[in-house]
Amino acid sequence: MRLILVVAALWLAGLPTGLAQSEDWFVLPTATDDEVGWMQPTVSKVSRELRKQGIGVWSSVQATRRFEQRGSSPPAELTASAIEAWSALSEAAVRQLANGEYSTALAQLEEAQGLSGTALEELNRDPKRARTVLDTCLYMVRALLETGDEAGAKAQAEACVRMVPGTAPTRYMHPPRVSIVYDEALEAGPSHGSSLLVESEPSGCALRVNGVLVGETPHDMTHLYPGEYRVQVECSASTLSRVHRVRVARGRTTLFVFAHFDRAVRAKPILHLRYDEPQNEDQRARDAREFARTLSAGAVLLASRPTPDSLELRLIRGTRKDSAFVRIGSASSGPDTSQVVDATATLLAGECKDFTGAEPVAFDCSTGQAELSLAGGSKNDRITEPRPPRGQFISGLTLASLGTASLLTGYGLMLARSSAGDDWNADPGSLSAHGTWLNIGTGVIISGSASSAMLVTAMPLVLPYKSKTPWWAWLSGGLGLGFTAGAIASALTADPKPPSSCSVNNLNPQPCVSRAKRTDLAIMLGVTAAPLLTMPLVYLFRKEEKKPKVALSPSIDANRSGGAFGVRGVF
């Protein structure tokens, strides 16, 4: 009974920690300069406040260790003295082999191999040292053969092939037996039928595997032995890239490396992102999600200093476009604890606020909308001028481009139909001329209606947000009214509908052709007016206090006998 109580107590004691670990967050500082003194205090204060709210938070030490295990690590650094000590071990082992002291040689070679394993990407970077690494590895093959361990020698030869890919040994330094075992290990076979495909963004970067330069990305390495390989993608010859430890299994393994992300990762004084130039929010969010994926973190809290006296905290969760966001005051040594309390409460509530002014200013997290104070104005003078979201703007720009092309096509077809009508007048009995005239008329209606629909739909998506209706929107509305008046006038001045049908049997097509010219012009002027009138309407009904209550959109109805312009919506 006492044992059961003890186990239960331990389980209950560990329960809060277990629950926190299921939704661990990571506070990730970002910077564009070398001022890093604010990072550690900021991470400590924010992490402490989040833990008070029941949120598990990765410590920087834990995050660094896990990131280097599952993501990438900085390349090893070897001092000249360490390289000399490694070379001395290898040379001493060769002398012991020559003297028949195989056990001593094997111990020295194992020590040398241990050093090689910790800094393989650095030793193999230089082709001469890479050959020495391979020769040292093959000395172990010799020592194993001399002690009668042929299976161990074969396994060691395979390890040599894996350690130094694409490098030839110094043949005269090794007896024939060693060369035979090594050559057998090089031959393609089922035991090393694995492959590794490495791709990168951008492509065309130098690819190093275990420090050896093997080509450029994308690159597919075949006939590999299963095991761990250290991959570096270097887009700049002057910068050593981070090392990705890839566990190659049997079959095909792939690795995609974002060179931009690798270049930004720093581990000192704590794990953070260091950009050479300011990045847009989309890029920083992608980098944050890469951290979350590598750490298996529930969310990443990006911390940055846009100005020397302010701190921004942006919460990134999964693939969601919107994110909670706060801005607070901060000194060079980090923010005050009271402001951190306000910031974390705002983030956990999923809200966006700016606390740097006299009073907090709310943001619209989904649209990026922020209240900005007018110069010299009061609280009541605040206006809202957010930018359209990127995806929305691109969609609107695409629709506007297609709509403009369709509108120009409609005007071209209108002119072509006028010419076809003249051809039908010249030859009333021509079936071909009559058919062309009718078909082009259908094209005018379809292209005109499609252009109007696309342009009207594009306006709310592509127009920038303004606190007041801009002058050019009013000008557009005036032009729209002018086009509308022209459309009405053209429709009213069209010839009356002919008493006889406008078929090929009509020997006097002039009234039909004349009426069609006016109605085609009326249709095209009307569809041109619709998007022009939409501009001021977007700003009139986009205002915050009216948006939920009013939804209007111009519309065009057209057919072969006429057309109409109107406004539809919900009031």
Image: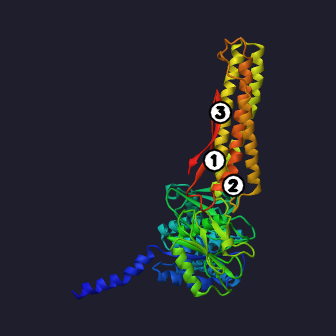
Label 1 residue SS: helix
Residue ID for mark 1: 457
The first of marks 3 and 2 along the sequence is: 2
Amino acid type of the residue that numbered disc 1 sits on in the rendered structure: Thr
- For residue 265, say whether it is visible: yes
For label 2, the crowd category at 10 Å Cα-Cα, with few meaning under 14, some 14 to 19 and many 20 or more, is some
Tell me the mark number nearer the camera, choosing from 3 and 2.
Answer: 3
CB within 8 Å, label 3 to label 2: no
Q: Residue 456 at x, y = what percent?
A: 65, 46
Q: Is residue 524 left or right of residue 313?
A: right
Residue ID for mark 3: 563
Label 3 residue SS: strand
Check the image and tell me how it is coloured. rainbow
Q: Is residue 58 left or right of residue 400?
A: left
Residue ID for mark 2: 463
Q: Give whichever of 34, 383 is nearer the camera.
A: 383
